[in-house]
Every structure is written in C-alpha cells, then in structure tokens.
Amino acid sequence: GLHGWQCMGTEAALSQDEDWKKIAKALMQQYAKRVQGSVLENKGSAITWNYTKVSAQQICKEIAVQLERYLDPDGGADSLMNGYPVRVAHGKGYVEVRRKDVDKGVAVRRVLDEITARHQEIDFILCIGDDMSDELMYDAVAKFAADQEQKQEQKHQQQGCPKRNARHEFKRHHHGLA
C-alpha cells in the first residue's frame, strides 16, 4: 500500500549504486572539508554537497560548478561518473548526484497512479516547489492531468456523449526560478 517507504530500484541497480555513491561521496567529502559550513548529505537515492549555510555564496557557486563538471556523466572519459546511470543537479545551495531513473517526478507519478489504481478519482493536485529540481515533479503532474483528461474523453466517446468543451488547465506559477 501507500504506507511507509518503498524502494524504487531493483537489487542489481541498488548494488551498482554503491559504486557511484562511493566515488561521489569521497569527492564531496573533500569539498565539505575545504568549505567551512558545507556538509555532505546521504539521502539514500542521492549524495549531496550542501552549501546553503555558507556565507560566501558566490564563491561556493563557482566551486559547485567545478564539482558539477567533475561529476557530470556526460563530461566524457575524464568524468568520475562516466558510464554510471546518474544525473548531476546543481540547485540553490547544493550539488547532487542521483540515479537518472529516480526523481521527484517518478515518485509523484507513482503515488498518483497508485491512488487512481484504487479507483479513487483525483480532482485536485497542489504541487509546490522552490527549485529547478522540482521541474520534473511539475512535468509529472501536467502529464498525469493530460492523461486523465484523455481517458475521460475516451470514456465519454465510448458512452456516446458529446465532446466536452471544458478542459482542465495546468498552470505553473514560477516564483523566483531562473
């Protein structure tokens, strides 16, 4: 059910995770030691270097760009994450390495699908975020809404109902996102 934590990966994927996590953790620990006030966070599905509490934000942003470049799996053979199924995100005060297939969008879609699978109609979704990492979540909600609307249209057509004029609108309100 929807009680407690659910693992989103297979045993093989979780085993492979240990390899990239060790590499990312070792590098990020060096950054945490170099930048007083920054910390390393192990979030289970991600390893994060967090510098939100450091007063010299501009310097940290420059250091974060360097860290992101070292970790970017698409950065070629010199990248420490080359060949691993990971994504590197640089947001407000952090650099994060996580699996490509595990993100807020995947999690939100799984929850919405489980609710509808239990024959519970969803008539309202409030999705709030404050960072670029939330974009995948917004996209998942928008796609879910579009899929639900398409299913409703098909259901009405099968029942011989006239086409509905009212359409759901998904509005994004970006506040302070660059």
Image (tube, rainbow, N blue to C red):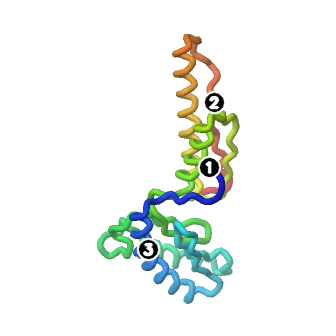
Residue beneath the point at 57% across and 29% down: 149
- Circle 3 crowding by C-alpha within 10 Å: few under 14, some 14–19, many from 20: few
Point out the tag, 2 or 1, that comes first from the N-terminus: 1
Residue beneath the point at 33% across and 68% down: 83
* 2 or 1: mark nearer the eye: 1
Q: Which residue is mark 3?
A: 18
- Residue lying at the far left of the rendered structure: 77
Q: Which residue is mark 2?
A: 168
The answer to whether residue 64 is seen in the rendering is yes
Image check: 155 left or right of 129?
Answer: left
Tell me the quadrant of the picture where the C terminus can be found. bottom right
User: Please, what is the three-letter code of the amino acid marked with disc 3?
Assistant: Glu
In this orientation, which residue lies closer to the viewer: 113 or 124? 113
x, y percent for residue 169 = 63, 33
User: Please, what is the three-letter code of the amino acid marked with disc 2?
Assistant: His
Q: What element does badge 3 sit on?
A: helix
In this orientation, which residue lies closer to the viewer: 38 or 84? 84
Q: Which residue is mark 1?
A: 1
Q: What element does badge 2 sit on?
A: loop
Up-down relation of residue 77 to residue 101 (above or below):
below
Residue 13 image-quadrant placement: bottom left
The answer to whether residue 66 is seen in the rendering is no
Up-down relation of residue 49 to residue 30 (above or below):
above
Mark 3 to mark 2 CA distance (whole Å): 43 Å
Residue beneath the point at 42% across and 79% down: 23
Up-down relation of residue 27 to residue 10 (above or below):
below
User: Please, what is the three-letter code of the amino acid marked with disc 1?
Assistant: Gly
- Circle 1 crowding by C-alpha within 10 Å: few under 14, some 14–19, many from 20: few
Point out the tag, 3 or 2, that comes first from the N-terminus: 3
* 3 or 1: mark nearer the eye: 1
Mark 2 to mark 1 CA distance (whole Å): 29 Å
x, y percent for residue 175 = 68, 53
